[in-house]
Structure formats: C-alpha cells, structure tokens
Amino acid sequence: MPISPEHSTYVRTQLARGVSPESIKDVLRAKGWTEDSLDTLFLEAFAPGAGSHETAALSGAPIAAVPLASLGDLFTRAWGILKKRFWVMLGVGALGLVPLMIVGAAVSAVVVMGFFGGLTNIAIANPMFLGFGALAILAALAALWMGVALLFAVRDDITGNTVFGSYALARSYVFPMLWIALLSILVVWGGIMLVVIPGIIAAVWLSVSRFVLVVEDARGMKALAKSKAYVSGNWWAVLLRLGALAAVTISISLAVNMILGLISGADPSSKDMTPLQNIGDVVVSIVTSFYSVAYLYALYISLRDAHPEVRTKTEHSNGALTWFILVPLVGVAIVAALLFNGTMPQLPFTFGA
C-alpha cells in the first residue's frame, strides 16, 4: 500500500497522544494494511526516506523501535487475530486429524485381529506390524505438518491464506521445524540438567523460535539464536506474558467446566464429567489452543517491532545455547560408552523370578 506523508504524520500524532503502537496497527489492519506495509510505515514515521528495515540498515538511517506490547494490548491483538483467522485455523486442524484417524482405525484393526487370533501367523503379522509402523511415522509427520500449517494460518499478513494455502506454505517447513524442535529439546534438556533454572531461561529464550522460522525463514540454530536475541533484554517481560497466557487459559477452562457442571447437575464429589462438560472441554481446548497460537504470534510481532536491529541481522551469537546442547549429548555419550564397555554399575535388584 502506498505510504504518504499524511500516514507518517498520523502515526506520530497518535503515538504522541499516548496511543499504543499495536492499537494504531489494529486500526490500519482493519483498513487492509499488511504487516510489511505497517513495518514500512512505522519506519517512515521515524526515519523518513528509509523505505524499509533493510534499506534503513544499509543506509545507516535509524530504525524505529517501539515498546513491547503491554499485557492488555497483547490479549486484545491476539483476540483480533483469532476472530479474523479462526475458521481457517479450524479447517487446518480438522484436515490434520484425518491421518490420525486413519492410524487410529489401523490400530483398532490390529487389536481386533489379534484378539480373535488373526495374527497368529507370523508371515502375516510381521508385514502388518511393519506397515503399521510406517503408517505411524507418516501420521507423526502429518501432525507436524498440521502444526506448521497452523503457524501460517494464524498469519494475517499473507493474502489469500486459506486452509489449503496454509498447508502449501507449510510443506517445505516440516523438516526444518522438526530440526528446530529437536534442537530446542536438547537446549532445554541441557538447561534442566544444569539445576533446572537454566532450562526455564532457555525455554523463554526459544518461545518465538517457531515464528522466526515461518516468518523470517531463519532455520536451525539461526532461528534459535534469533529468538534468543529478540527475548534478550525482555526476558522477565516475556516470562510474565507467557505466564499470563497460561493463567488465563487455565482459568477459562476451569470456569467453563464448573459452570457446565452446575448446569448439567454434575456430582461435585465425582471425578467423572457429564456429557455437557466433555463437549465444553473439547470446545474450550480448541479455542484456547488457537488463541495461544495467536497470542504467541502477537508476542513475536511485538518483540520484532521492539528489536528492529535484531530483525535486520542474519547472524546472531549462539551464546549459551551451544553449551546447553552439548550437556545432554555428552551425558548420552558417557552412558553409551559405559554400556558398550560393560562397566555400568549393576542394579541392586533383578527382574523376574
């Protein structure tokens, strides 16, 4: 969208009046502005003639940084995204359930055949179990594909981003996302092995790494390092915002369950839920899950706006991330070496008779 001096003046005037950047962006989004256009507009408002973050970085022009969105702004922004993208996200989730249902049917078939003696012939059983294993792997990849598609479905800056469009965009990011997930597990696991607290620190550092991948196409350790760079300097603020999201979603779930229990006459002393509570639990789980994705996306956008100097850089220091990854790898290597050499200490008990 063409940017005029009037647009830049409007942004500066609204900010001078105390209006938050996210509120200004919400107004402009409602008028059809994309995220890239908004980024350029805010840059022009503070660095006229720069044109874009990349151009500003090359020309040496200052890049406008805006404060991290407050809790209220973040919840409002996430709700706006959810209202706009809910049906697309629901379609992505529903389509992603199909391969999982196929695997579930296959498991049921194997159990039934085994119960009635249909798998006593090893010539039949072995290929069937191998096929089931391959199907389970494909289902896991399909579930990961669905997860990545949800990250694209929540984005409101892509024109024509439909259910199938989200899956098409996500297709080439399935294995990069798997790699990021494995690296993140190693980092957090390594941090936890270092007296737990470093693991919590690392988990907050990596809280927006998935969006760094799907929005900025930074992969592997680059995505993790860039996520850490965005969060650095705002660690406590990000932890507070993540904690607030958890508190709100849990509170809503408990409140809805309690209200539906009163309506359906549930026995307070019983752990069993009524059919109405079960239905409500499913609906609330879907809505809060989608809202959480929208909230994390809004948090990522806010961190990106607050740290334009991070966005324009392609290389960031891994810092402690590398050491956190090495800790569990070294531990596994030591255990493997001990097992290989037969020097693992014997357990003080034995299994069986």
Image (spheres, rainbow, N blue to C red):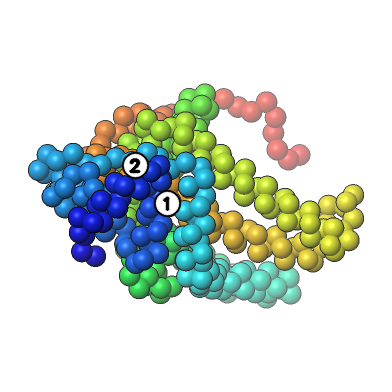
* Residue at image coords 65%, 74%: 109
Which amino acid, by three-letter code, is at mark 1?
Ser
Residue 328 at x, y percent in the picture: 44, 33
The residues tagged by marks 1 and 2 sit, at their Cα atoms, a distance apart of 13 Å
Sequence order check, earlier mark of 1 and 2: 2
Secondary structure state at the residue bearing disc 2 = helix
Q: Left of 158 or right of it: where is 103? A: right
Q: Left of 291 or right of it: where is 64? A: left
Foreground residue among 4 and 29: 4
Residue 172 at x, y percent in the picture: 32, 63
Q: Determine which quarter of the picture holds residue 341.
A: top left
Say if 246 sits above or below 25 in the image: above
Badge 2: how crowded within 10 Å, few (<14), some, or many (20+)?
few
* Residue at image coords 29%, 55%: 38
Task: Indicate which disc residue 23 carries.
Answer: 1
Task: Indicate which disc residue 109 carries.
Answer: none
Q: Nearer the viewer, mark 1 or mark 2?
A: 2
* Residue at image coords 34%, 67%: 32
Badge 1: how crowded within 10 Å, few (<14), some, or many (20+)?
some
Foreground residue among 277 and 28: 28
Residue 346 at x, y percent in the picture: 60, 27
| Labels 1 & 2 near each other (Cβ < 8 A) | no
Which amino acid, by three-letter code, is at mark 2?
Ala
Foreground residue among 76 and 352: 76
Residue hosting label 2 = 16
